[in-house]
Image (tube, rainbow, N blue to C red):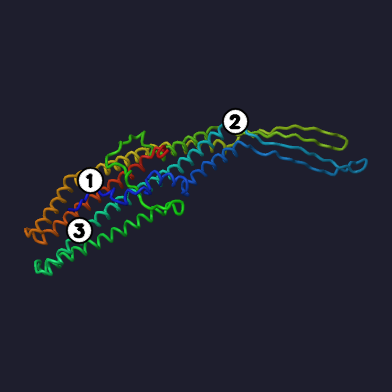
Amino acid sequence: MIRWLPLLCAGILCAQEATDARTLLSLFRSHHAIAKNFELEHERQEALKSLQRAGAPYALFGSVAQAKPYVGPDETEYAVGISKRFVLPQEQSRIERSSDLEAKIALMGAQQTLIAYMYDLLSLYHQSCLQREKVTLLEQLKQQMEELNRKNERAYALGEVSKKDHFMWQLQQRKTTLEFERQERERLALFRKLQGYFAEHLKIAELSCTDLYPLELPQKYGVQQGQALLEYRIEALEAERSRALSEVALVREAEWSLSYEKESDVERYRAGVNLPLEFTSDATSQQAQLHRIETLQHEQKLQTLEVQMHKARQAAYIALDEAYRRHETLEGPMSQEAIELFELTQSAYGSGEASAVEVIATQQQVIDILMQIHASKEAFYEALFTYYRLSITGKEFE
């Protein structure tokens, strides 16, 4: 009698060299370009903030003139000095605040992309494990059909089985073999795709598949918990940045200068200051008005986005719940009863109490049920990772 389940820990499937999901995620964060870009983005933002704090460079200026007095010889006059533009403390604080917000926006976007790719990797890991389980099941079926067909070959040679039944067994065996080969090709394609995430950094010999997410409903995230509102937080920060820039100052920056002038028989030391009066320009007030309008637009967009994200999460959770309930209906007693029915029919055929048609039909029914169970698992994990992508908190995999 063939043991159909469980299939995950048979022989080489649980070999010590098997790679688990934790290892895949760790190597992904260490070597994948997406993860490296996230680290580089962090460094880039730090460099940008340092650049903002650095301020403007000193400026060296000078001039030379040839003077021709009415009396006396020509004289050379010159002036030399330095100047520097600097931002007033209040304005510098506003600039740095805006710079910090821009850095957070960029890092959040990069982090969201990174986490989404990690969920993609986990999804592919689960798909590969489920496909391997399906192939193992079909291989067992194929071996069983080959064994039954050998018996029928002998029985046919002895005249104990009709030519019709003999042909039916051969056709069923070929059908099972072709389905096994098709699913095996799909397994290899998924395995190569998973290996492609790591190139030479990791040679995957075998997958562990003992750490799959449980087939149960996860916590339902609330509107404020869900932080698939990384988009929401990004937009909120953009609104805050816009609001910061909309503040109008009387004076934002100043420029001072020191110079030495040699003019004829006079030496002159000069100190000066230049204060642009922002409030005297129509452009400044118009810019402030523009920022205020943009801020209001951001706030309206945030309200719409919050509703959209909430609806998207709700829809994803409903789909996940439906996938879970479908799997619960198929898994368990239904699959076990189908397997027992096939084994009983097979025994009846061996004793002459059932025809080949009944055995083959029952086997096909069992295969259909088991394939439906696998499809329900695949649908559950697809819905699960879709929901997780919509519920990113920014703290996953820390």
Say which amino acid is labelled 1.
His
Disc 3 designates what residue?
Answer: 144
Work out whether mark 1 precedes mark 3 in sequence or the reverse, and give the earlier one. 3
- The mark closer to the camera, 2 or 1, is 1
Disc 1 designates what residue?
Answer: 327
Residue drawn at (19%, 44%), measured in percent from left and top?
332
Work out whether mark 2 precedes mark 1 in sequence or the reverse, and give the earlier one. 2
For numbered disc 2, what is the local secondary structure? loop
Decide: marks 1, 3 in contact (CB < 8 A)? no
Q: Residue furthest right?
A: 72
Work out whether mark 3 precedes mark 2 in sequence or the reverse, and give the earlier one. 3
Q: Nearer the viewer, residue 14 or 241?
A: 14
Label 2, label 1: how many angstroms apart (C-alpha)?
67 Å
Does 275 sit above or below residue 137?
above
For numbered disc 3, what is the local secondary structure? helix
The crowding category of the residue bearing disc 2, from other C-alpha atoms within 10 Å (few below 14, some 14 to 19, many at least 20), is: few
Disc 2 designates what residue?
Answer: 250
The crowding category of the residue bearing disc 1, from other C-alpha atoms within 10 Å (few below 14, some 14 to 19, many at least 20), is: many
Label 1, label 3: how many angstroms apart (C-alpha)?
27 Å
Residue drawn at (75%, 34%), measured in percent from left and top?
258
Which picture quadrant has residue 157? bottom left
In the image, 261: left or right of 59?
right
Residue 290 visible somewhere in the drawing: no
Q: Residue furthest left?
A: 353
In the image, 73: left or right of 104?
right
Q: Nearer the viewer, residue 193 or 19?
A: 19
Say which amino acid is labelled 3.
Gln
Say which amino acid is labelled 2.
Leu
Q: State the image coordinates of residue 375 (x, y, percent, origin top left).
A: 25, 51
Residue 255 visible somewhere in the drawing: yes
Q: Nearer the viewer, residue 272 or 51?
A: 51
